[in-house]
Amino acid sequence: MKEVWENIKGYHGYQASNLGRVKKGDCFIPKKNPNKQENLNYKTISLRNENGTKIKLLHRLVLETFIGDCPKGMVGCHNDGNPTNNSLDNLRWDTQKNNCFDRIKHGTLNYSFGSKNGKAKLIEKEVSEIKHRLSLGDNPKTIAKDYNVKVWAIRRIGNNITWKKVK
């Protein structure tokens, strides 16, 4: 496929290609992966204009440049399920529901719950201890520090939003 370049709206001198690359003038902008700790591979690009620097998801930037702004209620989807393949022919605007169906089709939807979830930072025993400490009135900030998690994670456990099955 021949590489085609289009100007990026709102960012003078920046261009995106249909193959998922970005450049300013003759300099290619490196792709970054800020979500590596979450095991996600969505690439981002830093763009600068008179309003400052903005970090954009590369797949959304390619779609916005070649297709247009994201329609209300839609998200940027990768047709092959590979978040590093940001070629225009692999991208589309679609609903979150259809994006979830894609994740099932490509086997990238995580069905694991509790400590079996690869992203879990706690195990069931720890959650049980956290719930007990919260019931005794311990400070969520202290508990979060003790378990090396964010305070919001402790609050979600205490409000029974996450880890509902653990008593």
Image (tube, rainbow, N blue to C red):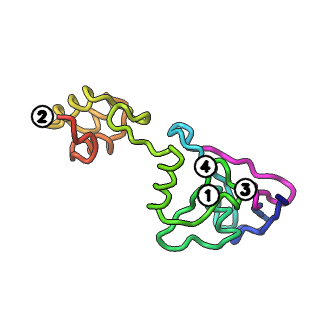
Pointers 4 and 1 in contact (CB under 8 A)?
A: no
Q: Specify which label sits upstream in the sequence, 4 or 1.
A: 1
Q: Secondary structure at mark 4?
A: loop
Q: Specify which label sits upstream in the sequence, 2 or 1.
A: 1
Q: Specify which label sits upstream in the sequence, 3 or 2.
A: 3
* Cα gap from disc 1 to disc 3, whole angstroms: 13 Å
> In the image shown, does 133 or 2 lie closer to the viewer?
2
Range of magenta residues: 18-33
* Cα gap from disc 3 to disc 2, whole angstroms: 53 Å
Identify the amino acid type marked 4: Pro
Q: Is residue 21 magenta?
A: yes
- Disc 1 designates what residue? 56
At x 87% / y 56%, what residue is drawn?
Answer: 26
Foreground disc of the pair 1, 3: 3
> In the image shown, does 44 or 11 lie closer to the viewer?
44
Identify the amino acid type marked 2: Leu
- Disc 3 designates what residue? 20
What type of secondary structure mainly makes up the magenta span? loop
Residue 85: x and y in percent read 67, 50
Foreground disc of the pair 4, 1: 4
Tell me the quarter of the picture where residue 112 sits. top left
Identify the amino acid type marked 3: Gly
Identify the amino acid type marked 1: Lys
Q: Specify which label sits upstream in the sequence, 1 or 3.
A: 3
Q: Please state, as top left, top right, bottom left or bottom right, where the N terminus lies in the image.
A: bottom right
Q: Residues within 10 Å of mark 1 (few under 14, many from 20)?
A: few
Q: Secondary structure at mark 1?
A: strand
Residue that protrudes farthest toward the front in the picture: 105
Where residue 136 is drawn, which disc sits there? 2
- Disc 4 designates what residue? 83
* Cα gap from disc 4 to disc 1, whole angstroms: 14 Å
